[in-house]
Image: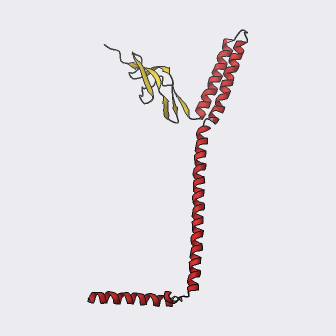
Amino acid sequence: MSEDKVAAGAAEETAAEAEAQAAEEGGEAPETQDPGELHALLEDARNKADEHWNQCLRLQAEIENLRKRAERDVANAHKFALEKFLTELLPVKDSLEMGLAAAAEGEQIDVAKLKEGTELTLKMLGDALEKYGIREINPEGEKFDPAFHEAMSMQEREDVDPNTVVTVVQKGYTLNDRLIRPAMVIVAKAPQG
């Protein structure tokens, strides 16, 4: 019973302290405020809440628009990713077509000129590939590396160290140091006996 009195006394003290603090801050105690003033405060709070709600809705719409724009940009990036690369390859195709057209004219073909044209076209292709990070793997004479080479067969050889690539059957390629296709190779092994 005495605990109830202590609790009631503490509650009265807390209420009295709140009233005193409100009076010190220049405001009146909540019970004595004018209803018109309270109505004005309530209207002000409602206006601020409406303003914040509208701001929230605008931000939400802006986020949705950004998400849609980002999705569209990614889709376009995927769709047109090869455009620059292909513009580099088109001159190679043009060069090959001109070579075939010259051969189809029926005139005597100079093999040296045909070889020179083919070499220039191949160089154009190699330059275009290299410009976009595609590197050729041509490991002839190098140690066999299973990360970049695929052994087609082994060949007994005395003139080279074992595990050395002696023939490249098909060149390999990397794209920005990532393997696209391993080089198909023939590897030396020590002679038996």
Residue nearest the viewer, comparing 90 with 166? 90
Going 58% across and 32% down the picture, which residue do you hit? Answer: 130
- Residue 190 position by quadrant: top left
Residue at the farthest left position: 1
Going 53% across and 88% down the picture, which residue do you hit? Answer: 33
Q: Is residue 2 left or right of residue 70?
A: left
Percent x, y of residue 91 = 68, 27
Going 54% across and 31% down the picture, which residue do you hit? Answer: 135
Going 58% across and 54% down the picture, which residue do you hit? Answer: 64
Percent x, y of residue 87 = 66, 32
Percent x, y of residue 187 = 41, 20
Q: Quadrant of the N terminus?
A: bottom left
Question: With respect to residue 24, does 113 lie above or below?
Answer: above
Question: With respect to residue 111, does 43 lie above or below?
Answer: below
Residue nearest the viewer, comparing 183 with 10? 10
Residue nearest the viewer, comparing 58 with 115? 58
Q: Quadrant of the C terminus?
A: top left
Coloring scheme used: secondary structure
Number of numbered tags placed on the structure image: 0
Q: Is residue 5 left or right of residue 62?
A: left
- Residue 39 position by quadrant: bottom right
Residue nearest the viewer, comparing 161 with 31? 31
Q: Is residue 91 left or right of residue 162?
A: right
Percent x, y of residue 19 = 46, 89
Question: With respect to residue 97, does 83 lie above or below?
Answer: below
Q: Is residue 151 left or right of residue 3?
A: right
